[in-house]
Amino acid sequence: MTRRQRLQPVTTINLIPLIDVLLLIIIFFMVTTTFKLVPGISLELPSSSTAHNVQSSVLRVIAVSNNEIYVDKTRTDLAGLPALISKRTGSGDASGLKATVEGDRAATYQLMVSVLDALRRGGIESVGLRTRVGQGSP
């Protein structure tokens, strides 16, 4: 070997450290990224021995209390429910729309009847009550 061959610089680039750094950056962003979580509603559905799964409806109404009713993620109260239903159904014929009502187990019977009345006054005749599949009443 001659002296000239030993002094020539290495002209290759080692990509392994670059790949390691990129993977660490990707892992860093995956770990530190925060996702906006939608707050959930704590709801305990009553059980029914004849319950079965239903395809999603056009209108979803969740009744927790007189002051907390949700229509497709929009919060309202019992007094504002008819206006929100009419706004949601629009000026067209609402008889073809379907609705699913979910009520907390502790919700009063009067609250559920009032929600059903508001839906009927809004022109929605096809209403289903959502329950959890269970062994019947406890």
Image: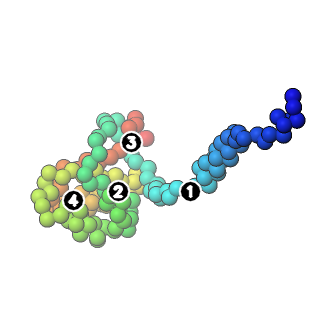
Reading the chain from its start, which is encountered first: label 1 or label 2? Answer: 1
In the image: residue 107, left or right of residue 35: left
Cα distance in 3D space between marks 2 and 3: 14 Å
**At numbered mark 2, what does the secondary structure look like: helix, strand or loop?**
strand
Of the numbered discs in the image, which one, if any, rests on residue 34?
A: 1
Depth check: 62 or 2 in front? Answer: 2
Q: Position of residue 96 (x, y in %)?
A: 14, 51
Q: Which image quarter: residue 10?
A: top right
Mark 2 surroundings within 10 Å by alpha-carbon count, few (fewer than 14), some (14 through 19), many (20 or more): many
Cα distance in 3D space between marks 1 and 4: 38 Å
**At numbered mark 4, what does the secondary structure look like: helix, strand or loop?**
helix
**At numbered mark 3, what does the secondary structure look like: helix, strand or loop?**
strand
Judging by the rendered image, the residue that carries numbered circle 2 is: 62
Cα distance in 3D space between marks 1 and 3: 32 Å
Reading the chain from its start, which is encountered first: label 3 or label 4? Answer: 4
Reading the chain from its start, which is encountered first: label 2 or label 4? Answer: 2
Q: Position of residue 91 (x, y in %)?
A: 14, 65
Cα distance in 3D space between marks 2 and 4: 12 Å
Residue under the image location 12 percent in, 61 percent down: 92
Cα distance in 3D space between marks 3 and 4: 22 Å
Reading the chain from its start, which is encountered first: label 1 or label 3? Answer: 1
Judging by the rendered image, the residue that carries numbered circle 3 is: 132
Of the numbered discs in the image, which one, if any, rests on residue 119?
A: 4
In the image: residue 11, left or right of residue 108: right
Q: Are marks 1 and 2 in contact (CB under 8 Å)?
A: no
**At numbered mark 1, what does the secondary structure look like: helix, strand or loop?**
loop
Residue type at numbered disc 2: Ile
Q: Identify the residue at the far left of this view.
A: 93
Q: In this picture, is 76 found above or below 131?
A: below
Q: Position of residue 89 (x, y in %)?
A: 19, 61
* Viewer-side label of 1, 3: 1
Cα distance in 3D space between marks 1 and 2: 28 Å
